[in-house]
């Protein structure tokens, strides 16, 4: 891609996106990264030698800028970069809560993109909702770039936070359980490889049964008569509802 890009924030999501682009052999005119913690930036550079660890003003002068920050610090950061951002610069925000309108007003820039990134973009297999401000410059080119991260689709801005809860954060509700099942399988007689293969293949089959069998929810659940943790299902559902709906209420605009 013959454009320069910048990342404000050098943490997890920047690492994920850079890895996704690297997997697809994408090259840029230049890549500049800034973080308030220089150690974080330098650690990222050790992995991606092509990036330039820069100051905030330099990053803000790039043609495409990714805002890879948590919502509480975004507005104050936008105020710091306003004088350096050009009208034609494309701003891609990776955070929930802060709307396109707020970003546009803060920067006097109408080229705003909001993406809810997924950790699974690390292997280019993700489900990424994106929205563009009206008349956003280079929309087709930006969409193609983001699509390298996985399945990327356009949606209305009002649904982004719902996708953050139901897609972006989804793996963290289950990953620890899957890894625990690998350990349990090892404890009861399978070796490391057998345990991993068993959990992986069984999960794939379970997902396909849930979404491709044509059976109803009750019919699917009834396929297995023994339910070892059935007595805890109500508690688990209550935890999910309480924690996730509570989190959604915190991150929605």
Image (cartoon, grey):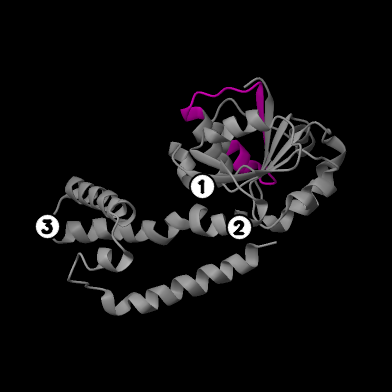
Q: Position of residue 91 (x, y in %)?
A: 72, 39
* SS category of the residue bearing label 3: loop
Q: Percent x, y for residue 164?
A: 56, 55
152 relative position to 70: left or right: left
* Residue at x-position 49% and y-position 54%: 167
Numbered disc in front, either 1 or 3: 1
Which residue is rendered at x = 64% and y = 67% of the image?
A: 250
Residue where numbered disc 2 is placed: 161
Q: Secondary structure at mark 1?
A: loop
First in sequence: mark 1 vs mark 3: 1
Pick the quarter of the image with the C terminus. bottom right
Crowd rating for badge 3 (residues with CA inside 10 Å; few <14, some 14–19, many 20+): few
Q: Is residue 121 visible?
A: yes
Q: For residue 9, what is the image quadrant? A: top right
Q: Nearer the viewer, residue 79 or 96?
A: 96
Residue at which label 3 appears? 189
The quarter in which the N terminus is drawn is top right
For residue 109, above or below residue 220: above
Distance from disc 2 to disc 3, alpha carbons, whole Å, reads 43 Å
Magenta extent? 22-43
**Residue 196 is covered by the magenta coloring:** no
Q: Secondary structure at mark 2?
A: helix
Q: Is residue 53 above or below residue 3?
A: below
């Amino acid at each position: 891609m013959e454009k320069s890009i910048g990342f404000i924030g050098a943490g997890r999501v920047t690492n994920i996106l850079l890895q996704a682009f690297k997997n697809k052999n994408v090259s840029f005119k230049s890549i500049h990264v800034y973080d308030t913690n220089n150690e974080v930036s330098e650690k990222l550079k050790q992995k991606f030698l092509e990036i330039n660890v820069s100051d905030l003003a330099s990053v803000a002068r790039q043609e495409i800028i990714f805002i890879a920050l948590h919502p509480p610090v975004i507005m104050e950061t936008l105020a710091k970069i306003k004088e350096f951002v050009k009208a034609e610069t494309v701003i891609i925000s990776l955070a929930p809560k802060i709307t396109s309108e707020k970003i546009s007003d803060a920067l006097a820039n109408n080229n705003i993109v909001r993406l809810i990134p997924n950790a699974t973009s690390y292997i280019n297999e993700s489900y990424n909702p994106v929205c563009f401000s009206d008349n956003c410059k280079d929309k087709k080119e930006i969409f193609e770039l983001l699509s390298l991260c996985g399945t990327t689709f356009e949606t209305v801005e009002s649904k982004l936070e719902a996708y953050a809860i139901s897609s972006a954060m989804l793996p963290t509700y289950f990953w620890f359980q899957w890894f625990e099942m690998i350990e349990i399988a090892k404890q009861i007689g399978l070796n490391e490889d057998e345990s991993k293969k068993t959990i992986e293949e069984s999960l794939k089959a379970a997902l396909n049964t849930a979404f491709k069998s044509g059976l109803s929810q009750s019919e699917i659940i009834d396929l297995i008569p023994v339910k070892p943790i059935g007595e805890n299902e109500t508690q688990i559902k209550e935890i999910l509802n309480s924690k996730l709906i509570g989190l959604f209420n915190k991150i929605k605009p």
